[in-house]
Image: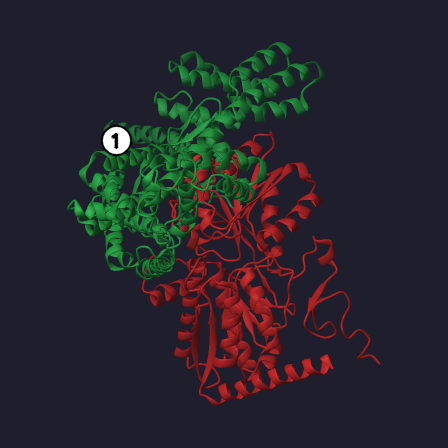
Amino acid sequence: MKFSFKSILSAGAIAATALVGTAANAADTIKVGVLHSLSGTMAISETTLKDTVLMLIDEQNKKGGLLGKKLEAVVVDPASNWPLFAEKQRELIEKEGVDVTFGCWTSVSRKSVLPVVEELNGMLFYPVQYEGEESSRNVFYTGAAPNQQAIPAVDYMLSEDGGAAKRIVLLGTDYVYPRTTNKILRSYLNSKGIADADIMENYTPFGHSDWQNIVADVKKFASAGKKTAVISTINGDANVPFYKELGNQGIAASDIPVVAFSVGEEELAGLDTKPLVGHLAAWNYFMSAESPENEEFIKTWKAFIKDDKRVTNDPMEATYIGFKMWTQAVLQAGTTDVDAVRQAMYGQKVKNLTGGVAVMNTNHHLSKPVLIGEIQEDGQFETVWSTDGVVKGDAWSDFIPESAKLTADWTYPYVCGNCEKPKYAGVAGM
Amino acid sequence: MTKFFKHIMVLAIALFMAAPTLAADDFSAQVDALNGKSFSKKIKAIEVLAEADNDRVVPVLRAMLGGDLYALKSDKTVVIAEKRGSVYLVHKADDGADLGQMAKSDIKKVRVNNKVRTVIKGILGGLTLLSPNVEQRQKAIDAVFNSRDESLLPTLKKAISREEDDALKAKMVLTKAAIELENAKDPETLSAALSVLKETPTPDVRSILTRYVASAPEDMKAEAQATLDAVESSLSMWENVGNLYRGLSLGSVLLLAAVGLAITFGVMGVINMAHGEMVMLGAYATFVVQEVFRAYMPGWFDWSLFVAIPFAFLVAGSVGVAMERGIIRFLYGRPLETLLATWGVSLILQQAVRTVFGPTNQDVSSPSWMSGAIEFTNGLQFTYNRLWIILFALLVVVGVTLILKKTAFGLQMRAVTQNRPMANSMGIKSGWVDAMTFGLGSGIAGMAGVALSQIDNVSPNLGQVYIIDSFMVVVFGGVGNIMGTVVGAFSLGIVNKFMEPMAGAVLAKIFVLIALILFIQKRPRGLFALKGRSVEA
């Protein structure tokens, strides 16, 4: 009884989306949802991505749009309020009838949107590096998974070039992304022969501003006679006072290097970078990358935003790659229908802004190059190390026992985001 | 004869020229090798270059360290380039010849990483250890201490015998001991080195000793361990002093944020949820002042904060007066409505700032006199910015107390808050006093913003971080009592900082909050409760 009631409900939902879908198709624009916070704590980071999507739509329309139609952006403001993300996503799909959404920054906002896009069979492009451990049929992850950022960064810090660190401090903001990443990193470090006694883990609240004790603790931890490095998953605003305190307590990068996963050009823009020269960041993109595509991208961005001082960063590139792939997939499928476009996404290729080619895999993650950069006096990063080729994003980390056995593959025979065995094992053979 | 002579001359000149040219060629090849393909090749090139007997070695390595070393895109010649606006002033690296101005597209940076930097610092240290300039020797000895390169020992000994500055000499002796400890074999030298190290208990020394104990030969182990223990115990004492300082510093920040609130909430009884935004406005006022200084008088930049303080006071103060006249005065005696209305104002102010300045953080720089730290030999550090903020907080408190106790305005203010009808009938314009009092509280919050801009983000969210803490301090210290606010702020700060190393930042905050709630249960009026009739007002 309960089962049938549920199926009626979902049938109703499908019918509703189908209706909305036809309504949108009948109009002569393709609607693109933009779900980024324009107010509240995350506005600092997310506003830039909203502008990036608007710029990309603008560029595409100059080229004549898609399938003979113009693209139309539908911008909503979820105001850094996680439950509101889900509401706004529902509004975008059900009321506005968007064919695709570009949005979210924090993992908690993505987790909030997830049930909505899955229920309504929407399509979300998520452009930020994250902790992995997820692969939804309705989400494409164009930011880095841990094996495309955290693991190579640790490898570099342990290597001769990176200073051959023997003791590691894991500093993070207290929420899901740093905690999961550090869990992965701890087991990875253990596998590299670094004992738990040589790992210090510390979490601070969002927006933490008094770093005196923690920096002093790091110093103390580093004075135990082994080369020490800090791996920082500190998020957002808290980074500025953290780096200021490092500078003031005289910790130079040559003594204790800090490698960060959430500090990009945008974050450094509000900072006096002189004391920070030599600290590192791991990303898939740096504004300083030298390629004709990147030069073009920066030029277009500065012209669009009408500010010559604005910088570009990694999530912007991820948005760019996601958007390009989506337009290519729509052209290939000849329609904006979510199911058709999803199939066309697999194997889609887009030139990275840093050189090389990004490929969309069947686990909905990209293959991208990984770069490590050192902060320079002008607030830019200088690439000091990069992977030889591209690294395939791994949805389920190999370094957490319970997730190592899971596979994400949305093509036959798996057709699943978190399965131990293929869903259709042996079915076709019969 | 003349012809023959000419020949000889030409030959002689040619010979004369050839010898140094050969050497110079060699040297410029060595300099050009700095632009090697990999970092390890660069390090080799640096080590080779360091051996060269040429007075360009030090400037070239300095440029490399500072990121001013470039290579011409045309023929890969290594050059030193300094940025002047949008162009670069380029000099040849090997002989300093002027190559004029070039655009960014003509040159490519010689990349260095941390490892290369460390190597250069060590080598530069060795090369400049005997420099006549005290500052250079200071830098050099720090670098040598970090690299502890055995080959520098003879130079170091020479430097010690020449050194006249006592502090520098001590550092050199310490460095010599550290190098000997790591390299010497005979027990006598080792014992001597250990006893030198024992005299200077710093974290660096602890680090060196810990490493040594792990690999010490059997006969030295006991002595090394004893030295390490002595260093450890002396360090842990200083760590407590450090904690105390950091507690005072956190306390001073809380105090600054709360003093304004102690007036608006404590004295007037207005629950002002927009108090944090006054702090934020003060920080943005600092940003604006700094932008003006940057544009019009960059030479005076270090003084910009002295202009920012009164400016921030005026900006936040006038917004406060406008708020009081426009909204709050209609809501006196209705705390719930005041709370909601001021909460609304805080959102409006945040979004307004976000619209005007953008959502990103603004870059507020610290003047040079606020950067860095006083370092004591035992590893204790007092950062200048925090030191100034402690001082500033105390000055603000003294100022506020003077205004309240010694001026006519302060007298009127106290009169109005204690007995409004009586004050009115004595001819005090109570409405005007209300507006000025609220303005004063807001203005002080603005001044707090100037101080906070030095240690925190200048973003539209700045205020939200401090609003809860401010209320906490005022309630804890006792409503309506400036002295209580001072004691409350410092004790919360110190307790927080002593809890943090044990419990972590998140738990420490929670514990402090729980302790505070329990305390309020016991003493609802806070640390210093007002007594007498004014309590009822």
Camera-side residue of A375 and A22: A22
Q: Position of residue A342 (x, y in %)?
A: 60, 76
Chain given the colour green = B
Whether residue B329 is visible, yes or no, is yes
Left or right: residue A140 compared with residue B282:
right
Residue, far bottom: A26
Camera-side residue of A92 and A133: A92
Instruction: Give the position of the N terminus of chain A as an image quadrant.
Output: bottom right
Position of residue B49 relative to residue A292, above or below, is above
Secondary structure of the residue carrying tag 1 is: helix
Amino acid type shown at disc 1 = Lys
Q: Name the residue rendered at 60%, 29% in the picture.
A: A225
Q: Position of residue B504 (x, y in %)?
A: 56, 40
Residue, far left: B427
Position of residue A25 relative to residue B509, above or below, is below
**Quarter of the image holding residue B499?**
top right
Q: Position of residue A332 (x, y in %)?
A: 56, 81
Q: Position of residue B295 (x, y in %)?
A: 23, 49
Camera-side residue of B332 and A38: B332
Instruction: Give the position of the C terminus of chain A as an image quadrant.
Output: bottom right
What crowding class fits label 1: few (fewer than 14 Cα within 10 Å), some (14-19), or many (20 or more)?
Answer: few
Q: Name the residue rendered at 50%, 37% in the picture.
A: B496
Residue, far top: B188
Label 1 belongs to which residue? B3
Chain given the colour red = A
Position of residue A7 relative to residue A132, above or below, is below
Camera-side residue of A349 and A129: A129
